[in-house]
Amino acid sequence: MAKTQAAPATGGHQRIETNNFLMIVLILLTVAVGGIVEIVPLYFQRSTTQPVPGLKPYTALQVAGRDIYVREGCYNCHSQMIRPLHAETLRYGAYSVAGEFVYDHPFQWGSKRTGPDLAREGGRRDELWHLRHFENPRATSPGSVMPAYPHLLENTIDWGAIQKRVDAMAMLGVPYDANALANANRLAYTQALAIAAKLAAAGGPSGMANTEVIALIAYMQRLGVDIRGAK
């Protein structure tokens, strides 16, 4: 039995399918229109542009910690976006909403989870746990595949960049008050001293106030705290 061959494209279809440049232009146009239709309305919805009740900007030290988190590539294995699914909320807590992230530049949503989601990590464990975890993840989480970050316990916080980080966030619309804008370095160091004191009191190492791990702990202990406190 003879095979039936499909009829060749004719007219407009033939012109598109045989012209690579025209095909690429039309595909890009389709994607662009679809993107505009999906994204533009979000800029006019209060639920995506207004902060949730109780949301506060990151402190100067937390901003420095967030940048260390980004630098070390933590987002490659940890998302910060809890999906509205029963299994997710049982494990991690309340699902994420857009208003939580209006002060995040950049946000750390992610989709890859080699490790757990961190959107509600703040306050779940004490500061010493976090220090030991960064130093050697297997010491706190047996079987963890997370790499160790002992250098964070030795590297010094870049205090000279603290004020610049806060100023940059303010330029992006984060509503810092006059005190935060005028005294970012002092406020950051005061918070670092408080965290270092907690570590020492809990039996951890002393004299850690200038180390990068302190800034990263400050950031971790902030995640999800505002929305949890607003409920």
Image (tube, rainbow, N blue to C red):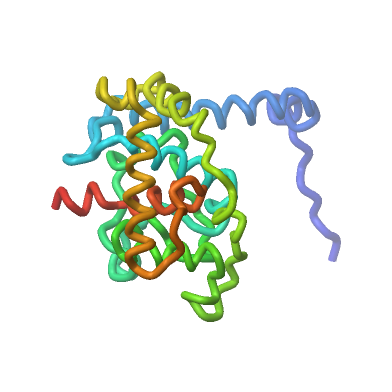
Is 103 left, or right, of 130 in this rendering?
left
Residue lying furthest left in this view?
231
- Residue 6: horizontal and vertical position, in percent? 77, 47
222 vs 153, nearest the viewer: 153
Image quarter of residue 117: bottom left
- Residue appearing at x 71%, y 29% in the figure: 23
Residue 102 seen in the figure: no
Query: Measured from the top left, where is residue 52 in percent x and y?
Result: 21, 40
Q: Position of residue 74 (x, y in %)?
A: 54, 53
- Residue 53 lies, with reference to residue 40, above or below; the image says below
Against 6, residue 41 (above or below) is: above
Left or right: 147, with 99 as reference point: right
Q: Residue furthest right?
A: 2
Residue found 41% across the figure and 22% down from its top: 167
Q: Nearer the viewer, residue 38 or 23?
A: 38
- Determine whether 80 is above or below 115 in the image: above
Q: The N terminus lies in which quarter of the figure?
A: bottom right
Q: Position of residue 174 (x, y in %)?
A: 33, 27
- 173 lies above or below 104: above
Residue 83: name its quadrant.
bottom left
Task: Say which quarter of the image contains residue 176.
Answer: top left
Work out which residue is located at the far front of the displayed protein and give it.
207
Q: Residue at x 35, y 22 (%)?
A: 173
